Amino acid sequence: MTLAVSGTLMQTPAPDRLTVADAVVEVDSTGAITAVHDRSTPEGAAAGQSALAAASERVELAPSTLLLPGLVDMHIHAPQWPQLGTGLDLPLERWLFEYTFPLEARYADHDFAAAVWDDMVPTLLAGGTTTAVYYSSNHLDATTSLARACARHGQRALVGRVAMDHPEGTPAWYRDATAAAGVDASARSIEAVAALRSPLVEPIITPRFTPACTDGLLQGLGELAEATGVRVQTHCAESDWHCGYAIERFGTSDPRALDRFGLLRPRTVLAHSDHLTDFEMAMAADRRAGVAHCPLSNSYFANAVFRVRQALAVGTGVGLGSDIAGGARPGLLGVCQDAVTVSRMLEDGVDPALGPAQRGVPDSRIDTVTAFWLATAGGASVVDLPVGLIEPGRRFDAMAVRLDRPGGLIRTWESIDDDARIFEKVVRLATADDISHVWVDGTSVKPGRFPVRDRRRQH
Ligand SMILES: [Zn+2]
C-alpha cells in the first residue's frame, strides 16, 4: 500500500526559515517518505503526476488546505489528563502533593488508566500531536497500557514509567519502595514496552526530578541508561525552589547534579530548564541533551521564562512541550503561540516601574516560524526521531489544515495575505477542528468522530 499526497506544503527546516511548495509527497508501504516532487517545474509536475497515478492511495488536498509536518510534544504527563485545566493555583512543590500525586496514584487501577489513555491519545492525535514524549505514572502496568494505547491508536511515542523514591520528595503511598526497586521496575518497564514490538513506541527512562529521587535511584538510572542506550527524560532547573533545593542537597546546580549521575546524555530530554545559565546550556549541548520548553507551565510554576534564542545560539537542542497538566493547553499549535508570547514578555520585561532598559532581556523574542520549528524539527532532533520535516528519508508524520472551515477562525484575503501571513494565521488560529487529516508513519490516524460517552460515568 503506497500513498501519495498532493497539496501546498509548508514547513520550517530551520528556526528562521519557512518553505512553501506545491508538492506531491510519495510514501512507501512502510511509511517512509521516498520523494517530494515540487510541481513548480514541468519536470516536478510530471513526476508528481506519475506518483499520484502509481500510488495505491491518493489524497489530493484542496488549494484551501495546507500540508504540514505533525507536531512533536516533548513533555506530557499522561496521568494528569483528567486534571487538565484545573488546580494551577499552588506553587509546584504543593501542587504535586495536593493535586497531582493523589491523581497519579489512582493509576494502580488498570481500568481507570485504560479509560484515560483511550480518551487522551485520540484527542491529542486529532490536534496534530503525531509524536508524544510521555511521563506515565509510577506503575509498571499502567505504563505498559499507555504504550499499548499509543500503538493501537497510531501515535508515535516515547513512554516512561516515572521513577521516584525519595522519602521526603514523594508521599509514602506513591513511590518506589527503594532505589533498587525503582531501578528494577524501570528496567522491567523498558522490557515490557519493547516487547510490544511496535514500530511507533519506545521506552524512555524517567527519573521524575531530583527532589523525588534518592542518589541511589539517580545513579542506578544513569547506569541503566548507559547499559541499555535508552533515552532519558527528567525535569531540570524548573523553579526557584527546585534550583535552591539542588544547591542545598548536592552543593551544585540541578543540571550539574544530573550530569554527575550520568543522566545528561545524548537524546536526554530536560523539561523546562528555564534557569539554565549560559554555561549549563553549553554543557547540555556538549552532552547532546536537549530542552523541552514548556512556555505556558513556565508562567505558572517556573518563576522564569526559558531563553530559547540564547539556547539555540550556543547549540542546545530545543523542542516544545505542553506539560499537560502544568500547562492547561493540549494542542501544540496553541503552545507555539504561548512560546511567542512569553518570549516577547521576556524581551520587553513586565514591570512598568522599571525603565525600558532595565525591564527585559534584549534579543529574546521568537516568531511563529521559530515556534513551529521547535514544535516539529527542533523537538524531533532532540530525541533523534526521523520526523518533524516532510522530506525523503523521514517518516510521513503529517497533518492537513483547512483554511476555510465553516465556523473556523482562519480567514484569508487574496489581495492581502502572502504565504508567510497564511502560515502565521494557521499557527495562531488553527484548532483541532481545522485539522482535516493526520498521518503517522504513513497511516491516517485522525479520529473520524470522538467516542461519544459520558466521561463522568464511571470514574
Ligand atoms: Zn512536567
Image (cartoon, helix red, strand yellow):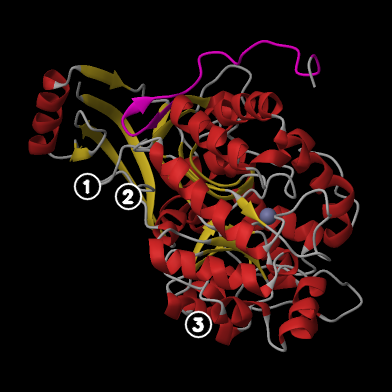
Mark 1 and mark 3 lie on one chain; the one further toward the N terminus is 3
Q: Amino acid at mark 3?
A: Ala
162 or 185: nearer the viewer: 185
Q: Is residue 79 visible?
A: yes
- Look at 77% across and 59% down and name the residue there: 299
Task: Establish if 139 lies above or below 268.
Answer: above
- Look at 65% across and 64% down and name the residue there: 179
Left or right of 167 in this view: 122 = left
The CA span between labels 1 and 3 is 30 Å
107 or 150: nearer the viewer: 107
Around disc 1, counting alpha carbons within 10 Å, would you say few (fewer than 14), some (14 to 19), or many (20 or more)? some
Q: Are marks 2 and 1 in contact (CB under 8 Å)?
A: yes
Most common secondary structure along the magenta stretch: loop
Residue 141: give x, y in percent of width and height: 59, 36
Ligand 1 visible in quadrant: bottom right
Marking on residue 150:
none
Around disc 3, counting alpha carbons within 10 Å, would you say few (fewer than 14), some (14 to 19), or many (20 or more)? some
> Is the CB atom of the residue marked by disc 2 within 8 angstroms of ligand 1's nearest atom?
no
Secondary structure beneath label 1 = loop
Task: Establish if 228 lies above or below 139.
Answer: below
Q: Which residues are magenta?
A: 438-457
Marking on residue 393:
1
- Look at 24% across and 38% down and name the residue there: 32
The C terminus sits in image quarter: top right
Mark 2 and mark 1 lie on one chain; the one further toward the N terminus is 2
User: What residue did someone put label 3 on?
Assistant: 282
Task: Establish if 123 lies above or below 323.
Answer: above
Residue 272: give x, y in percent of width and height: 65, 64
User: What residue did someone put label 2 on?
Assistant: 386
Secondary structure beneath label 2 = loop
